[in-house]
Image (tube, rainbow, N blue to C red):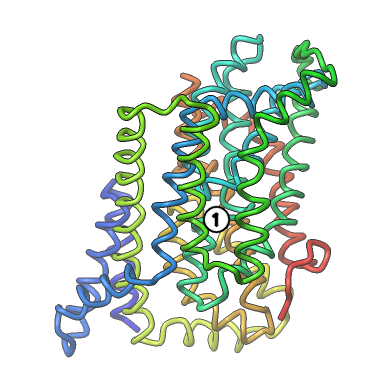
Amino acid sequence: MIEVLLAIVVFIGLLLLGVPVAFSVIAGSVVGLFAIGSLPMEALSQQSFAGATEYSMLAIPFFILTADLLFSGRLGAQVIGLATRLVGRFRGGVGMTSVLTNAVFAGVSGSAVADATGLGKVMIPWTKKLGYPAQYGAAVNASSSVLGIIIPPSIPMILFSAASGASVAAVFNAGLIPGIIMGIALMFACWFVAWKHNYPRVRAKLTLKKLLIDLLIATPAILIPVILIRVFLFTGTATVTEVSVLAAVYALLIRVTMYRDLTWKSFMRSIAESAASTAVVMILIMFSSALSWLLTIQEAPQKLATSLLSTTDNYYLIVLFIVLILIITGMFLDMSPAILLLTPVLLPLAHAIGMGTIHLGILMVCTLAMGLYTPPVGTTLYISAGLGRVGINKVTRELLLFYVLIILFVLVVAFAPGLMLIPTT
């Protein structure tokens, strides 16, 4: 066990020094394996590559490419226009527009970072232009972009499925209702903050003709989660990897045939940016797999479960302990490595108290999602603050109500999963 503690200390130490997460992880793994002494170093490289060879991992680059193809075209602006006509005239309607738009594209990208960047480039300047403070637009974008990892398809859910052995389709299906409820909670926060500060409303004229036109043009984006995900994946017609390829081909076809705004140059740019994003995710997967293997061979997860259960067997206290671990981890570690590292640790503990694998996966994704816009390592927080050209502290203060509502949301997921139709077995 001392080898595992040494690996974790090295990992956290390098992380605090500013070393990139992936390299901190592999450095900790090397130190831990060296401390064991009886295993060859070649085992780390073998385990690293083994973690990247899961068939479902092929879905990641294609979902990222799908999002990039749709974000960079007319469709993105059209979806924003539709959302504005629906909720823009309400108090806080600008924020609600951002939430609705993220909810639509959540069924396409599977990535909070992709949504925060792609939509933030449009939404935050637009919010400022309408008279809202920059920190409001940045706060809404930072929090609503995490819908992209809760409403399926979701890259973190694919990673959890690979790490736990759970069905990708089952995890996707369980994430739909929590994602919708989270979106409603965020829209309430947008309204309350705007009402409290008397922010202006958007005078978006709503007519049946304009609404139908916007809806017709935005329909292709809506069809991806409705048809490709709900029909093909959940009926078993296609695997998640095959669905991701279909989604990318579909996005390419509608850009070429319907919108006719895809040039060869923009297509190659989408390919390059998607490849770069995929590379970042895959190197995290590889190195995290090595550390997870080290934890497994030292039986660290089982020892943690035994130690905790010897202290208390109260289901609610242990679930609260899991939630606290996830919240604290999410504040310091990015989503992908957190899921890959914590799943093998928490899964035995969850099974010991009777928590189902799917329930644990949704709880992990929903709780760790909050870390994406929580200091000190909030990815979507920094992206949104940078796009809005506003200080992190101002955005964080604007997010206080959002934090309260999402913590309540996480507690409901943890202790009342049945209310969100999350399987408990």
Q: Position of residue 281 (x, y in %)?
A: 36, 54
Q: Quadrant of residue 294?
A: bottom left
- Quarter-of-image position of residue 262: top left
Front-most of residues 376 and 156: 156
Image x and y of residue 331, in percent: 50, 50
Label count reads 1
Task: Give the residue displayed 29% in from the left and 39% down from the top.
Answer: 272
411 shown above or below 343: above
Left or right: 233 in relation to 111: right
* Position of residue 375 in the picture relative to residue 364 (left or right): left
Vertical arrangement, residue 301 with respect to residue 142, above or below:
below
Q: Please state the horizontal and vertical placement of residue 330, each as a whole percent of the image.
A: 51, 54
Picture residue at 45% right of the left edge, 34% below the top: 382
- Up-down relation of residue 111 to residue 51 (above or below): above
Which image quarter: residue 143? top right
Few, some or many residues within 10 Å of mark 1 (<14, 14–19, 20+): many
Q: Residue at x 48, y 62 (%)?
A: 242
- Residue at 77%, 60% (x, y): give it: 412
Q: Is residue 105 above or below residue 409?
A: above
Q: Secondary structure at mark 1?
A: loop
Q: Quadrant of the C terminus?
A: bottom right
Residue to which mark 1 is pinned: 154
Q: Position of residue 186 (x, y in %)?
A: 72, 39
Query: In what quadrant of the picture does the N terminus appear?
Result: bottom left
Q: Amino acid at mark 1?
A: Ser
Residue 149 makes an appearance in the image:
yes
Q: Is residue 323 something that shows in the picture? A: no
